[in-house]
Image (cartoon, coloured by chain):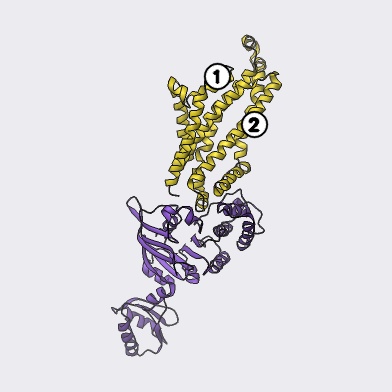
Amino acid sequence: MKGFLQFAWKEVLEIVRTWRIWVLPGMLLFFALSGPLMARFTPEILKAVGGSEMAALVKAMPKPSYLDAYGQWIKNLSQIGLFAIIIIYGGLISAERKSGTAILVLTKPLSRTSYVVAKAAVHAAFLVVSVCITTVITWDVTRLVFHKSPGGPLWSAVVGWLALAIFFLGVMTFLSSLLDSQAGAAGIGLGVFAALGVAGMWEPLQKFSPAGLVGAPTVLAAGKESAILSPVITSVGLAVLLVMAAAEVFRTKEL
Amino acid sequence: MSAAVEIRRLTKAYGPKRALDCVDLTVEEGSIFGFLGPNGAGKTTTLRILTGLAKPTEGEVRVFGHDVVTADNTVRSQIGFLPDVPGFYDWMKAREFLRFAGGLFGLEREALDSRVDVLLDLAGLTDVDTKIGGYSRGMKQRLGVAQALINAPKLLMLDEPTSALDPMGRKEVLDMLLSLRGRTTVFFSTHILADVERICDTVAILDHGHVVAHAPIDELKARYGASKVVIEIAAGADELADAIRGESWAAAVERDTNGTVFVTVSDEDAAARAIPAMVAQRGLALRRMEAGEMGLEEVFVQLVGGDRT
């Protein structure tokens, strides 16, 4: 257990002291700050750059509300956010194998299972904390801009998205312990993302699998109802299974 | 004395290629063991199996009596390992890395702090405050040796530990290994024969996945040195060397510039009878004739062939 905690602490330090602290949180912070402003001022911007024709079109559009800001936030998470997770975590396990650091660590009393689980757990926590902090920021900015920001639609959508993101972290943990190539793992990860989009069209999968979380957060952010409990449970459960499978694959690998 | 490492019929195959083929080795506890071999002989593969990084195809590998395939942490807590090219977290500093490595062994804070100080001093990195990413290869190698010693291991395994070091760095590492004699079993692979000759008690020579020699270093040199004869004559060394080359018992003949002829012989008695007669027949003045000692380099070249190092 000491070895597990020591290695997990190393992962935390690595996040804080390297590019990792800037890329995902930086990107999320940018979306958190710009989303509500874009939602609020897009009509004005369109009018300013589009002339009289655009002004007429904008006049016909409904007045922007806090729901547009929420929609903007979830859209950014669902597209660019998931792509970033898939690409960043394509080398979660393989990068240390290739750099040789895994050899120094794994010839000490740290099991390969602990190695994989510590990495997945720390990065899942990092993901959750980053998204929660930036969600609070976008929530506050929305309140400032629109003077109204009920939490229900925003947080239910974020919970749904986080479950999907954790599922993808599990997928990437598995793929990066299976493959040496970060690009290869990321490519397959993007393939899984596309396959989930298609699978979501079949109702049973939409109701009970991570495929149901591809579109549900957008629906929730728009203030509508969507049942996400089953897909959330399935996604988190599958993520755990994928990390266990990654540990088993890594345990049998030669370094 | 009991065995620190026991390897029996170890075979490692990658597809049809056998990197190791039925290797048998025993390393006594407390000894400094040199594992010699040309590049590609299988030294690193053996070390990877010993440390649990790779699995044997066949055979049995035991460290302090534990099977390395099934023992997991039991073995790992007793060993220190330095790979040929150690990979570090570039964003850490040396002290931090050593503390991290010690933490993986579950060392308590006080013991760890004092051990880190000693090892930083040993590695000459006490006053270095830069991140590891800015280190030279030699500094990384010294840090690698230090991290391998963080748990005061019973068995220290090093893969080519001196190959990246300058002469001073090499001397420091070898002196450090020498200081461990009797307390820690040192198993190190190298192709630098002078290093082995300087500090090892026992040596094994690996070639194409086979152990071609395994003995205490003095015994090995004596075994092969006995078949060498050194002849020193006042003049006419070239003529004598040419004559000896034609004899059936002469495996190899060399000579230096000051009249000394070195003969590797296949039949010592025949050489002892024939050489004085050949000297007398040519009217040459014999100054010295003795069994010469073959250096480890010559033993190595003789055993694995001179076309590789």
Q: Nearer the viewer, residue B218 or B67?
A: B67
Q: Is residue B279 above or below residue B205?
A: below
What kind of element bears circle 1? helix
Percent position of residue A245, x then y = 44, 39
- The C terminus of chain B appears in which quarter of the rendering? bottom left
Image spot of residue B306 (x, y percent): 38, 67
Image quadrant assignment for residue B245: bottom left
Residue drawn where x is 42% and y is 52% of the image: B70
| Residue A130 x/y as whole percent | 61, 33
What hue does chain B carry in this figure?
A: purple
Residue appearing at x 31%, y 85% in the figure: B274
**Around disc 2, counting alpha carbons within 10 Å, would you say few (fewer than 14), some (14 to 19), or many (20 or more)?**
some
- Give the Cα separation between the discs numbered 1 and 2: 22 Å
Same chain for the residues under marks 1 and 2 in the image: yes
Q: The residue marked by circle 1 belongs to what chain?
A: A
Q: Position of residue A246 (x, y in %)?
A: 46, 40
Q: Is residue A233 above or below residue B250?
A: above
- The chain in yellow: A
Task: Give the residue at mark 2.
Answer: A133
Residue located beneath label 1 in the image: A219
Residues at badges 1 and 2 in contact (C-beta under 8 Å)? no
Tag 2 subunit: A
Q: In the rendered structure, which amino acid carries the disc numbered 1?
A: Val
- Quadrant of image for the N terminus of chain B: bottom left
Q: Would you say A182 lies left or right of B59 here?
A: right
- Left or right position of B256 against B137: left
Residue A183 in view, yes or no: no
Residue depicted at 46% across the width and 56% down the height: B51
Task: Name the amino acid, label 2.
Answer: Ile
Indicate the secondary structure of the residue bearing disc 2: helix
Say whether disc 1 or disc 2 marks the residue closer to the N-terminus.
2
